[in-house]
Image (tube, grey):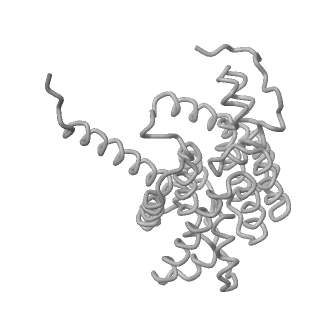
Amino acid sequence: MYTKNFINPCPDWATALFNGFSQVLLLRNPLCGLCCLLAILLTAPNLVGGALLGALAGLLTAQRRGYERADRQAGLYCYNGVLIGLLISAVLPWSAILPPLIIAAGGLSSMLTHQWRKRGGKLLIAYTAPFVLLGWATLLLASPAANGPVEADAAYALLRGVGQIFLLDKPMAGLLIVIGLYLANPYAATWALIGSAIGGGIALLAGETQAAWLGLYGFNAALAALAFSRQGEKPWVTLLAIACALLLQPLFNLLPIAGLTAPFVVACWLLHLGSHLAQLNQRRNAPRLHS
């Protein structure tokens, strides 16, 4: 049961918020979160207010409802709020209703994350699923906007693939996020770049040149790489996660709205389910000891 008053406040609001930004990358590191916030501030200043408001709404909701303090401090109730705040600010025109909408969405993302953590178990981990659901609802209200042309530069595309995790398409944004990743976990950071590179390469081979240069095939692959490399999985498992996310992306591209990070989420669920079934099968086939 959760209490309905402000108890056990987070000991450090700034750390909790910065951790929330880094948790978008599945890492807990306030310096990494600061780099992510700087990436938004310097390359898309019109979105930074929405990101902070969404994160704060998620954190306040978690505190108001008495969720575990350690989880709040880790940023686990902020990161979906960061993403939905960014998306709402990016696709909906400014109006007086926009801040309350971001606050409501950020708070709802916190509650969804909490329920998912309680009921999803180890197979259906929340990841960015609350953001995807709320993001799809947001996109149904928005007018679709076409992406402008970008230069055909492999290095820029690599960085954009990482930056697109935060809906940012500037190479500088990707560079700042990569710096944050290396500060938090160099091994995972390297895998994120590998995932972005593989995604961009596959897009080029498939003839999706504009999507490749924009990094639109890189961010789900980068997230899948982060999800498994940070856990010390064997490299082939991380590569399988990347491949699965890329195989799912064309299916989600068939939707009338953007798939957002759904390919990454579903790919991780499938790998967790596959691992669980393999363990069950191994136990079933294990030789029985006779007394």
**Closer-to-camera residue (67/107):** 67
Side of 161 where 203 appears, left or right? left
The residue lying at 61 percent from left, 51 percent from top is 138
Give the quadrant of residue 52: top right
Question: In the picture shown, does residue 281 fall above or below 73?
Answer: below
Note whether residue 255 is visible: no
Rendering quarter of residue 58: top right
Lateral position of residue 18 relative to residue 122, left or right: right
266 relative to 210, above or below: above
How far across and down, in percent of the image, does residue 5 sit? 74, 14
| Outermost residue to the left | 290
* x then y, percent, for residue 282: 26, 42
Q: Is residue 205 left or right of residue 159?
A: left
**Residue found at x 74% / y 45%:** 29
Q: Residue at x 70, y 38 (%)?
A: 75
Q: Quadrant of residue 200?
A: bottom right
Would residue 180 be seen by someone viewing this image from the given angle? yes
Image quadrant occupied by the C terminus: top left
Up-down relation of residue 121 to residue 5 (above or below):
below
Q: Residue at coordinates 59% horizontally, 55% vertically from top-left? A: 139
Q: x and y percent of residue 14 in the render?
A: 84, 38
Q: Looking at the figure, which quarter contains the N terminus?
A: top right
Could you tell me how many numbered marks the image carries? Answer: 0
Nearest the viewer among 280 and 104 is 280
